Image: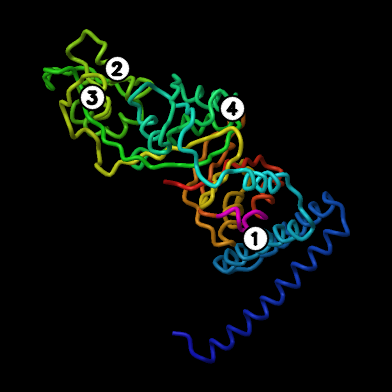
Amino acid sequence: MVTMETRDELEAIDLEIKALVEKRLKLTTRNDLMMSKSESALAGRKYERELLHSLAEQKDYNLENCERMMFQTLFNVSHSYCSSQNGTKSHLSESIKTALENTPAEFPKSALVACQGVEGAYSQKAADKLFLNANIMYFRTFDGVFKAVESGLVKYGVLPIENSSYGSVTQVYDLMKSHRFNIVRSVKLQISHKLLAKPGTDPKAVREVFSHEQAIGQCSQFFKDNKDIKVTIVANTAVAAQMVADSDREDVAAISSQDCCELYGLQVINDHVQNSDHNYTRFICISKDAEIYPGASKISMMMAIGHTPGSLSDTLARFSALGLNLTKIESRPILGSDFEFMFYLDVEASVYSDAVITLLCQLDQDPAAFTFLGSYSEV
């Protein structure tokens, strides 16, 4: 319990710290204006390194660690403040402004949409949930969906991004690095996998099961309990159902949906193959041009973060300083680079906030690669 005397003393110290921080921010901003960008960066880096090194001279390691965290945070805040005060310019703010002005007030009810797989795929179900009348064009691969949107062949593409029980769809994340697109909406779809086979098939006779890698992972316990069943990975759960329907074998089955059961004339031979009934997959809807519809409350981005100690925590601290909630962090290795990663972040934030726009523009101006993927709502 804090006594009144202690509280008064703490308040006096905090007010003094506040005044000193404000004085420091103004001083560093004025100093930056008097020097070239490279001179300021080198001088600042040298000073910060020397100060942090001097902290190691004290014997109390815990105190040293706390002071190091405090000063590192202060340095990050100073860099952000200087950038905003010294007129950091970014094309990003203009592109977001243009998207806000040009986007219709309502999300379209119909469109030509690209999906991976064949009729009955979960991506098709997600597209039907997003659009009242979706004219769907199917592609064999996720890359085909990205290319169809990028080339203008279709207006939108729908792609699975993560599953509640089996994690991220890494193929999609890896493809993001090589394509230009914008996320305009996302949707969560409840997944209910079933084991499908031809009518009359004896469940004990099944020797091989076709399905997508994600679906297999979401039904891992079933395969642990049936080690004699061969698993064959195919492009899509709907493709798996189609393969079983077209096969002349009586010992094959597919992990797919009830829709595919009806569509391809199959029979459910096991209704409880997935690990959890609470099984959801999140899908993103992408477009070639930026669209930001009213009510957008989520922002997605990807960035490369410097391969130095504290780089990730320093970046995350910038979101924390604005009270922003990061709902997703996914890292994927950068091909051709040793131990360097691209990070994908989802944050609950609005582009109508000046502070958020400033932060995005600062990240866009950082030397490391940064891509704004879109501002959207989830349904």
Q: How far apart, in angstroms, are the residues tagged by discs 4 and 1?
A: 41 Å
Read off the residue under disc 3: 261
Q: Quadrant of the N terminus?
A: bottom left
Q: Residues within 10 Å of mark 1 (few under 14, many from 20)?
A: some
Q: Secondary structure at mark 3?
A: helix
Q: Give the residue type that dot 3 points to.
A: Cys
Q: Which label sits on residue 72?
A: 1
Dot placed on the residue nearer the N-terminal end, 3 or 2: 2
Query: Which range of residues does the magenta coloring cover?
Result: 350-358
**Does residue 333 show up magenta in the picture?**
no
Give the image quarter of residue 7.
bottom right
Q: CA distance from mark 3 to mark 2?
A: 9 Å
- The picture places residue 252, in percent across and down from the top left corner, at 21, 16
Q: Residue under circle 2? A: 242
The residue type indicated by label 2 comes to Gln
Task: Work out whether mark 3 precedes mark 1 in sequence or the reverse, and give the earlier one.
Answer: 1
